[in-house]
Image (tube, rainbow, N blue to C red):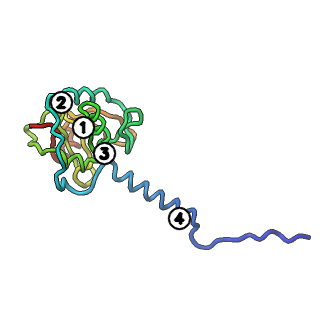
Amino acid sequence: MASPPFIAYRTGPCPEWTSIRMLAAGLLCLWLAACAGPGSRGPAMPNPDIDPAQRTEVIMTALSLLDTRYRYGGSQAHQGFDCSGLVKYVFGTATGATLPHSTEQIARMSRPVPRRELRAGDLVFFDTLGRPNSHMGIYLGDGRFINAPSTGGQVRIDRLDNPYYRRHFQSVGTLFAR
């Protein structure tokens, strides 16, 4: 009679599960970062000084993307957008400007504008995750802006006087020349 095969039992953590947990932790960190960058505006980056005559093209391009699905890390219409991916795509398509895919970096390259001087095509920044520049949108005029707000959502128009956005409003910047 043959003896039964030897069965080894592990004690302690399984290496496969450790790898899976590390991957899950990394994905969670990416998800929590959403489209944000660390800290405040920090040192300025070069402003692209886009021709102000292109403001209308920026708005029309942004409006053409209404209802496009949200996708973390997305920066193309066919795959979906996160907030900075939407801004990067709109300005790249409408003006040819090359922008980073980061709210923090876009905030640093934009020229600060007083809120009372906000114009269509300017950028609005919000602190939605307890840190500066964690969300952004493109101002449309009349207190409205277009943005890619969150997982499960779509590109949509919101109002600056919406209680949520009023509470989290941070600053205004522009990429347009004076």
- First in sequence, mark 3 or 2: give its number: 2
Q: Going by the image, does 58 lie left or right of 178? A: right
Which of the pair 74/54 is nearer the observer?
54
Q: Going by the image, does 149 lie left or right of 142? A: right
Residue at the spot of label 3: 101
- Judge depth for marks 1 and 4 and give the one in front: 1
- Judge depth for marks 1 and 3 and give the one in front: 1
In the rendered image, the quadrant that contains the C terminus is: top left
Whether tag 4 and tag 3 are in contact, CB under 8 A, the answer is: no
- Judge depth for marks 2 and 1 and give the one in front: 1
Tell me the residue at 23%/32% (across/down): 95
Is disc 1 placed on a helix, strand or loop? loop
CA distance for labels 2 and 1: 13 Å
Residue 144, image x, y percentages: 20, 33
Residue at the spot of label 2: 55
Is disc 4 placed on a helix, strand or loop? helix
Residue at the spot of label 1: 97
CA distance for labels 1 and 4: 43 Å
Q: Going by the image, does 147 lie left or right of 114? A: right
CA distance for labels 3 and 2: 20 Å
- First in sequence, mark 2 or 1: give its number: 2
In the rendered image, the quadrant that contains the N terminus is: bottom right
For label 3, the crowd category at 10 Å Cα-Cα, with few meaning under 14, some 14 to 19 and many 20 or more, is many
Whether tag 4 and tag 2 are in contact, CB under 8 A, the answer is: no
Tell me the residue at 85%/71% (across/down): 3
Name which residue type carries label 1. Ala
